[in-house]
């Protein structure tokens, strides 16, 4: 591969304008009802990979709320690798997710996979997720850019930092500034985990962009046993939040069972997160570094 010249590199970097710190030096804070993403304490988004039934999503919403999560996740339109895998409950799933959010007071995040579904998804969701597989679906990016709703943009599994920010730029350029970036692991030769969670990208994004960035340790590892350590590592790297797959009975999950944690593990993780935040505050006070 030919190396880029310094000028080429600079031009490429400057091809994202609105997403850059040159354009907006201060951190962008995204308000989702009474929660803020960016700048403050980390936002915790939790819930199942897929909405499966009313009982499942209500039970999950209650348990994650009780443990201190700020937002509820749950897929209704699922981008599955195999056409024979569970594809999600569609509109019924959106309705159940909304109901669970309303009952618990949690804002809800769900994925939109096609431009034709945007109006429907926006009717029920507080935050629209663009999945990894669609990070460069430019028509989808432009269309959510015309909404007045926060967008959670997941990094493509082979996207560079610049490509990631250029995808965010598509949304910003249409007028929607409410973009939350999400690192969810990239494809590498490593075969001990589903993906390689690239925590380098968190401080690297922060150095050049004002947009908040959260981390998905569930898809980033594909392994339930790695979710807790990588969640804590993500916060130590400066992530503005986490999105974690949680199910009342993880082994029964209709999608991503192997990376989904249960109530006891989530409770333990939330406890550790609280302790970490306390430690960070105390450290900052003592060191006057923040
Ligand atoms: C998901 O969040 O369930 C999902 C499909 O994520 P990703 O697009 O990161 O694979
Ligand atoms: Mn999933």
Image: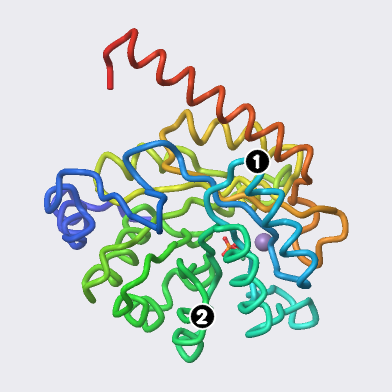
Quadrant occupied by the C terminus: top left
Marking on residue 121: 2
Q: Nearer the viewer, residue 56 or 218?
A: 56
- Judge by depth and name the residue closer to the eye, 46 or 87: 46
Q: Position of residue 243 (x, y in %)?
A: 56, 51
Left or right position of 146 against 153: left
Q: Position of residue 229 (x, y in %)?
A: 64, 31
Report crowding for label 2: few under 14, some 14 to 19, many 20 or more residues within 10 A (C-alpha).
Answer: many
Q: Nearer the viewer, residue 133 or 188?
A: 133
Query: Which residue is depicted at the point 78% across and 64% down?
Result: 56
Q: Looking at the image, which residue is at 31% across and 62% down?
A: 178
Residue 54 placement (x, y as % from top left):
76, 72
Q: Looking at the image, which residue is at 33% across and 54% down?
A: 30
Residue 106 picture quarter: bottom right
Q: Are marks 2 and 1 in contact (CB under 8 Å)?
A: no
Q: Secondary structure at mark 1?
A: loop
Mark 1, residue position = 67
Image quarter of the N terminus: bottom left
Residue lying at 71% horizontally and 49% vertically, measured from the top left: 63
């Amino acid at each position: 591969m030919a190396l880029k010249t310094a000028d080429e590199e600079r031009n490429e970097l400057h091809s994202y304008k609105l997403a850059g710190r040159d354009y907006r030096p201060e951190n962008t804070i995204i308000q989702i009802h009474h929660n803020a993403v960016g700048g403050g304490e980390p936002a915790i988004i939790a819930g199942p990979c897929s909405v499966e039934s009313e009982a499942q999503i209500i039970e999950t919403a209650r348990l994650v709320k009780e443990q201190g999560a700020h937002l509820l996740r749950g897929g209704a339109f699922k981008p599955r690798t195999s056409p024979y895998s569970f594809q999600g409950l569609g509109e019924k799933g959106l309705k159940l997710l909304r109901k669970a959010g309303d009952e618990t007071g949690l804002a809800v995040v769900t994925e939109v996979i096609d431009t034709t579904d945007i109006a429907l998804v926006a009717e029920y969701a507080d935050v629209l997720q663009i999945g990894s597989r669609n990070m460069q679906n430019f028509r989808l990016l432009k269309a959510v850019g015309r909404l007045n709703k926060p967008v959670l943009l997941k990094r493509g599994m082979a996207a560079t930092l610049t490509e990631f920010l250029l995808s965010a730029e598509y949304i910003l350029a249409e007028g929607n500034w409410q973009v939350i970036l999400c690192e969810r692991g990239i494809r590498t030769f490593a075969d001990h985990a589903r993906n390689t969670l690239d925590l380098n990208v968190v401080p690297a994004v922060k150095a050049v962009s004002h947009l908040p960035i959260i981390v998905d340790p569930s898809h980033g590892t594909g392994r339930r046993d790695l979710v807790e350590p990588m969640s804590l590592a993500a916060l130590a790297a400066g992530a503005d939040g986490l999105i974690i797959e949680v199910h009342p009975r993880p082994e029964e999950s209709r999608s991503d069972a192997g990376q989904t944690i249960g109530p006891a593990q989530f409770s333990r993780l939330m406890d550790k997160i609280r302790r970490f935040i306390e430690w960070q505050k105390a450290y900052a006070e003592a060191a006057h570094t923040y």
